Image: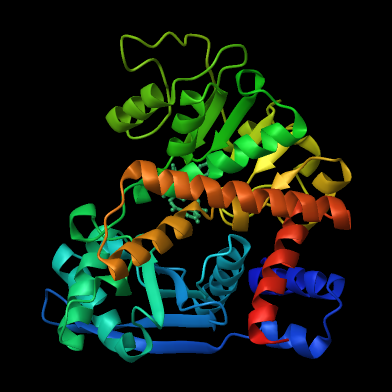
Amino acid sequence: MQPIDSFGNAVKKLREAGKLLGYTEENITKLSTPDAVLERPITITLDSGEEKSFHGYRVQFNNARGPYKGGIRFHPNADINEVKTLALLMALKCAVVNIPLGGGKGGIQVNPKELSRAELERLSRAWVRAFFADIGPHKDIPAPDVYTNPQIMLWMVDEYSKLAGKPSPATFTGKPLENGGSEGRSFSTAQGGFYALRELGQKIGMRPRDTRIIVQGFGNAGYNIARIANAAGYRVIGVSDSKGGIVVASGKLDPEDVFQYKEAHGSLQGYTCATASCTVDENSAVTNAGLLEVDTDVLIPAALENQIRADNVDRIKTKAVVEIANGPITPEADAVLFSKGIPVVPDILANAGGVVVSYFEWDQNLKNEHWTEEEVLRKLDEIITREFAMVWLKSREKKVDMRTAAFIISTQRIAEKMGL
Ligand code: NAD
């Protein structure tokens, strides 16, 4: 298979939106070019006393709407192209939910599982020293991403505050609750995805209790959306993790029980009820590829990119898709789903709950406030509901899929602030 050019694909989509808006090539170039692509060595002393350098990145894509915002990932495959793509998508994501932030992303090419806790702390602090002059609460606000977490954000805030000579919690989001983090942040991506699912159901006439849901991926985002949807009365009939999945064709799963089983056994393999109150008995094992092809009402990819492609899209039997993972559908498969009238709520809208609550965290830090979970979720609901309606309407008006509509809205919002 040809390697997928994700930056090229994102720019292609942006160009398509720009053309529909009547923008010139010149302006499309301005919109699709990052403000800064920073790459610096991150050098630490290992526990052995040896020095080691890693590639460190920060891409600041666009700050026309507010300070750059985006996570930092520690991953062996992190490279500048990936970081650039994610930074562009962050700019569009913040614009589509209309929060006053721009787009950025960062990372280190490293396998954090090979480092001790002390080495990981030194690496996190070294990243901050390398990019200190480029970040800040009104300049660029990083957050956790793949293999980075609230503890890493705490080390980073501490390092930044030492260098700045004053406490600066608003420079990073995704901090632990007791250190300036926001209520609801840990499940905010799933919560936002759930609001998008609920709004979609209302548009296409699916009542919760009659809506069967399949979730690919049972990590932070996948487990939480399954849990929230189940609590709201939806029928979760299938879930999977990297080892495979389970499907209950005629009944429904209890995501809390599945979670308990996964905690106890490390994966979903061989799932049987973990708690006494669970009654599911006719579940069957299914492969990851097979799970995507099960007859359902809503499919929620919440694991990896490029899961629905030209080679399997014809076997997908869902009536709708809500993209919690970033980029789970290739452009070719997207076109096929659109031609079959299968609505797809795109990642930049469906998984924006995380960045919206990050924005709330930043706002609370700057105002020295702490909002209740109820307040956070109410504000998140308002934003996702309002912007879902905008994207839905635009897709009808322009006769395009919801991804194109979301790109049109976000591109236009950024362009306006750039004065294009
Ligand atoms: P996670 O690491 O907590 O969970 C990932 C899950 O996917 C795990 O259960 C893993 O077993 C499963 N998985 C891996 N390979 C799989 C495969 N081939 N088939 C099925 N399942 C597989 O990650 P997460 O935070 O839940 O993120 C999941 C997706 O959502 C990613 O694409 C991420 O970029 C996106 N996302 C997450 C957030 C967030 O706040 N957590 C925000 C925006 C986007």
Marks counted in the figure total: 0
Residue depicted at 65% across the width and 38% down the height: 199
Question: Is 179 drawn above or below residue 264 in the view shown?
Answer: below
Answer left or right for 164 relative to 195: left
Answer left or right for 85 relative to 354: right
Question: Residue 412: percent from the left, percent from the top?
Answer: 72, 73
Q: Which quarter of the figure has residue 2?
A: bottom right
Q: Is residue 146 visible?
A: no
Residue depicted at 37% across the width and 29% down the height: 259
Question: Residue 104: percent from the left, percent from the top?
Answer: 49, 76
Q: Is residue 236 visible?
A: yes
Question: Residue 123: percent from the left, percent from the top?
Answer: 24, 75
Q: Nearer the viewer, residue 5 or 279?
A: 279
Q: How is the image coloured?
A: rainbow
Residue depicted at 56% across the width and 17% down the height: 248
Answer left or right for 402 relative to 219: right
Image quarter of the C terminus: bottom right
Residue depicted at 64% across the width and 48% down the height: 307
